Image: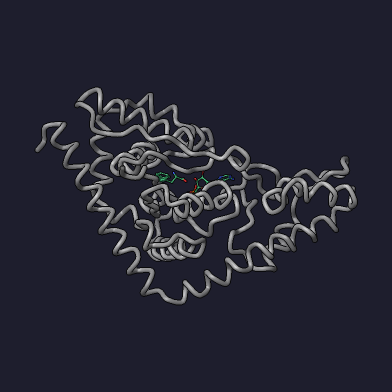
Amino acid sequence: MSKKILLSGVKPTGRPHIGNYFGAMRQFVELLNSGAYECYFFLADYHALNLIQNAALMRQNSLDLAVDYLAIGLDPSKAVIYKQSDVSANTEAAWIFDTLVTVPYLERAHAFKDAESKGREVNVGTFNYPVLMAADILLYDADVVPVGQDQKQHIEYARDIAQKFNNAFGRTFKLPDALILENVAVVPGIDGQKMSKSYNNTIPLFATKAEIEKAVMSIVTDSSSDLPVNVYNIHKLFKSQVELEPIYETHKGKYKILKEMLIADIESFIAPLRERREKIAADVKNIHTVLAEGAERARAKADLKLAEAKRAIGVS
Ligand code: AMP
Ligand code: TRP
């Protein structure tokens, strides 16, 4: 029996943070290592183009994210690791899907509504974001898509689009399921809001010791309570509740000590990852080889599916 297919992507928009890691990337590694899935992990560079319109920065970010993937333990001999832009079939399929979805339907997408509510002029790429994402998923026959909570709606869009296509042209695409871990669905940032690059409240996944110290020392605490909730909620990612309870009981109200303990726990978690990342980053040629080989395998898979879709719609 063939394995289920697992696929996910991350936008190369700068250094990943521990919200990306605990919310999504850690699951990539665990699920890959479980051996239960045929895995595809990609850099969503065409999605990032909505935000990054600078060639040098795009190149650097993409290379960096590929290094990050390898450093967290995604093994290119076990998973297909590639750049979205290397697979033309993705953007071609997105066009086909564009003809199946309506404007009001896309207007209901959270990302679009957020951008619009900020009074920004929204580009068509941002508006169409969920359609390209549907193509990313559906062309690979993905069964499961591990993501954080903020991507849940996008996976529902991919399902809807698959269903619409299948209704119109006959069964072609599989309906994917999101895989979201409840306890880390939304990792909080140092201000207690969702951790996000755009809120400037992150702890970078490969942070230096000094960066960890600075971030933790700026965690917002509310002096009206003995329990510094924002500190505790981040600490929970690194130690179990059973381990944390006595610590927070003993040091009730002593925010500084608790923050120092959190710094030590984050540092001992990140230090080995950081070291591994440095070694991997030193061999740039290897990263390019990994991406080139991944692109070839991804194209082989996606092209077949696109050909099937083109037959179904009557253009070939
Ligand atoms: P992005 O950087 O937006 O491409 O996000 C990469 C992955 O990290 C996606 O699966 C997101 O859902 C996930 N993610 C981003 N921020 C958080 C957060 N604060 N908590 C949990 N998951 C997150
Ligand atoms: N939208 C996702 C994010 O911001 C990135 C992404 C693009 C993705 N295409 C995907 C994730 C397909 C999973 C599957 O995090």
Q: Residue at x 25, y 49 (%)?
A: 301
Residue 111 appears at what percent x and percent y?
47, 36
Q: Is residue 166 above or below residue 8?
A: above
Left or right of 164: which side holds 57?
Answer: right
In this rendering, is residue 14 above or below 316? below
- Taking depth in this image into account, of 175 and 227 the one nearest to the observer is 175
| Rendered location of residue 196, percent (x, y) | 58, 48
Q: Position of residue 159 (x, y in %)?
A: 37, 31
- Indicate the position of residue 3 as horizontal and vertical percent values: 35, 45
Instruction: Give me the residue at 73% from left, 63% from top.
Output: 213
Question: Foreground residue, 192 or 259?
Answer: 259
For image coordinates 76% across by 49% down, the residue present is 231
In this rendering, position of residue 236 left or right of residue 247: left
The quarter of the picture where the N terminus appears is top left
Where does ligand 2 appear, by image quarter? top left
- Looking at the rendered image, the quarter that the C terminus falls into is top left
Q: Does residue 171 appear left or right of residue 280 in this picture? A: left
